[in-house]
Amino acid sequence: MNHDSYSDAYIRGILESVRTIAVVGASANEVRPSFFVTKYLVAKGYRVFAINPGQPPGAEIGGAPVFARLADVPEAIDMVDVFRNPSAAAGVVDEALRLDPLPKVIWMQLGVRNDEAAAKAEAAGLSVVMNRCPKIEYGRFSGEIGWTGFNSGKLSSKKPLLAGGFQHRRLGEPGESGS
């Protein structure tokens, strides 16, 4: 697969099909991007597990229970979101490939690209995304990102329908731009 560019259908298909996400490198520091992403994915209805061996058992990060390793998560993981440096991504992929069942997706965050790790995951039948953020992509597809002044690349005359709270939208909702 060409990891320099992903089709909207590929990214959206992943976001619509996964239900459980392990965020490897989730930080308890509320100003870190991994904290924001973890909290956002929880708010969108995904079952999220924060992987951080430095946190005590029973802790939470952004509303997600914390585990030291992927193997400690007590249920199947659909997607592993890698918030580690590119050289550490290979070890995360190796750990993910030891899970049973295997996850469906390895997602490497913005700034994280490891082509060897991606090739290993793809050889095992996993989908791979590199150098992208699921929070940004979800916001782009749901139309939320347009609320903050970013060009989502989607035009619609439909008035957005918002859920409770502040600007919480879900993929596939009526009024969604770009569907």
Image (cartoon, helix red, strand yellow):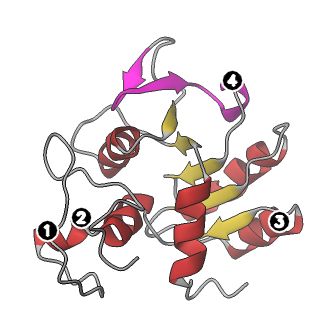
Magenta residues?
Answer: 59-73
Tell me the kind of residue under disc 4: Asp
Per the image, the residue denoted by label 4 is: 72
Q: Earlier in the sequence, mark 2 or mark 4?
A: 4
Q: Position of residue 126 (x, y in %)?
A: 77, 61
Q: Which mark is residue 147?
A: 1
Q: Is residue 162 above or below residue 50?
A: below
Q: Residues within 10 Å of mark 3 (few under 14, many from 20)?
A: some
Cα distance between the residues tagged 4 and 1: 38 Å
> In front: mark 4 or mark 1?
1
Q: Earlier in the sequence, mark 3 or mark 4?
A: 4
In the figure, is residue 119 to the left or right of 48? right
> In front: mark 3 or mark 2?
2
Dots 1, 2 in contact, CB < 8 A: yes
Q: Position of residue 13 (x, y in %)?
A: 59, 67
Between 20 and 80, the residue placed more toward the observer is 20
- Give the residue displayed 13% in from the left and 46% down from the top: 166
Tell me the kind of residue under disc 3: Lys
Locate residue 73: give its quadrant.
Answer: top right
Q: Quadrant of the N terminus?
A: bottom right
Between 19 and 21, the residue placed more toward the observer is 19
Cα distance between the residues tagged 2 and 4: 33 Å
Per the image, the residue denoted by label 3 is: 120
Tell me the kind of residue under disc 1: Trp
Per the image, the residue denoted by label 2 is: 144
Between 179 and 128, the residue placed more toward the observer is 179
Q: Earlier in the sequence, mark 4 or mark 1?
A: 4
42 falls in the magenta region? no
Locate residue 151: give its quadrant.
Answer: bottom left
